[in-house]
Image (cartoon, rainbow, N blue to C red):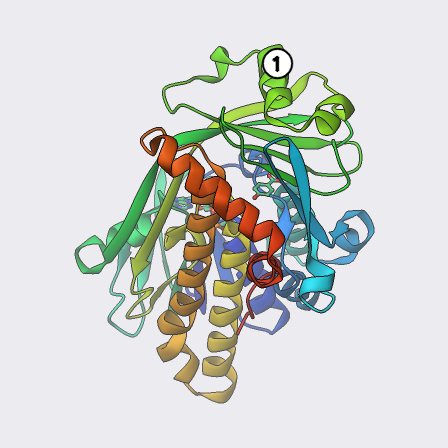
Amino acid sequence: MDTQVVIIGSGPAGLLLSRLLHLNGIANVVLEHRSQDYVLGRIRAGVLEMGAVDLLHEAKVSERMHIEGLIHEGIEISFEGRRHRIDFADLTGGKSVMIYGQTELTRDLMDALAEDGVPPRYEAEVVAIRDIDGPRPTITYRQNGEEHDITGAFVAGCDGFHGVSRASVADKVETFERVYPFGWLGVLSETPPVSDELIYANHARGFALCSMRSKQVSRTYVQCPLTNNVEDWPDDRFWDELRKRLDREAAEAMVTGPSIEKSIAPLRSFVAEPMRFGRLFLAGDAAHIVPPTGAKGLNLAASDIRFLFRALLEHFVEGSDAGLNAYSQNCLSRIWKAERFSWWMTTLLHLFPDDGPFGRKLQLAELDYLTQSRAASTALAENYVGLPFD
Ligand code: APR
Ligand code: PHB
């Protein structure tokens, strides 16, 4: 079989690219290792920058998001028993973010592709990528125990951090990495959020985050040792720990309930350079990882896809390869700024076991400065709502 673009992976990056290409008449096939239910069962972040919202609008999948999503014009930073609001609207000239779960967005994209008769091929594991330096790369995938080949003009490696795309060019990639000495224990619960906006809490016991998926569903996190398992954290222990890390008013307002999902995730910063190898283009988590503090992962995947989609359109419609040639550089310039911001938010808000009392005093001084200085608050707000997509 032959197509124009072979897309590996049906996370948000792969699905969004497929949809945008399809709407513009560019044939493509998405190959996904897992089942559709498995992909929809993954709970991930839920904060979208307006650049991502605009792209979803362009992909004609924003209807439900505009009805069910929540617009947030600020966040709260909590430390030393008090909360301080960072007012995005005031500091950035009216900008905001959209709260809408990645799971919902994934479902919207899957539904749109299925409705158009071009759904991803699920349970199709890519096992080899060949001839990326020739005119027509070949992708081999395994489905129902049989191997199949598919050729295309381009390959989009949207197969996440553990995928086959980056691994296939391992000898040509330079990687940059930082691993953090703690994890996030996350709980999804059918309980109203503690506050109307997200609370990021720095506490001597460790970081905590009160986020949400809707006005009825909370997503909350506490920093925990990497050696912990979810079995170490029965619901009661989780809620007690979260309560201890919040200010008194938030602790009292907190409504607890049984967890619907509970998981521990490690924190990592990672970038692979370059992002283009002949006719293979890496996008999203396949090329970079940010720690979740600041919610940049999904937004970076969206901005990579915007660059890649525009570049492919230019190639197929105008016959120009300028966008394809600039892809890696365009993406990486934006990625490194988001890497810096996510690393900084992580450093500012977490308890680092080896930092000691001096490190803790510096953190508190920085938090104090951040919440008192308009210039410092503006720098946070500007990055949180998102730097330009192009
Ligand atoms: N063949 C086919 N599919 C594969 C293969 C393979 N060999 N290896 C991995 N995949 C699939 C995975 O099963 C997964 O569904 O690729 C998909 C990658 O999706 P994501 O991990 O969601 O990555 P991405 O689309 O880049 O999303 C980035 O979503 O994952 C979050 O934290 C991430 O928010 C960020 C955003
Ligand atoms: C989430 O809602 O899951 C979330 C929100 C903000 C973050 C990270 C995760 O910074």
Q: Could you tell me residue 245's position as x and y percent? A: 59, 25
Q: Is residue 321 left or right of residue 100?
A: left
Q: Is residue 165 left or right of residue 228?
A: left
Q: Which residue is mark 1?
A: 235
Q: Could you tell me residue 387's position as x and y percent? A: 55, 66
* Residue lying at 74% horizontally and 32% vertically, measured from the top left: 193
Q: Quadrant of residue 260?
A: top right
Q: Is residue 193 above or below residue 323?
A: above
Q: Quadrant of residue 212?
A: top right
Q: Is residue 60 visible?
A: no
Q: Nearer the viewer, residue 195 or 173?
A: 195
Q: Quadrant of residue 279?
A: bottom left
Mark 1 crowdedness (10 Å alpha carbons): few <14, some 14-19, many ≥20: some
Q: Is residue 356 above or below residue 333?
A: above
* Residue lying at 17% horizontally and 56% vertically, measured from the top left: 171
**Number of marks in picture:** 1
- Amino acid at the residue labelled 1: Asp
* Residue lying at 62% horizontally and 47% vertically, measured from the top left: 106
* Residue lying at 50% horizontally and 24% vertically, measured from the top left: 205
Q: Is residue 113 above or below residue 135?
A: above
Q: Circle 1 sits in a helix, a strand or a loop, which is it?
A: helix
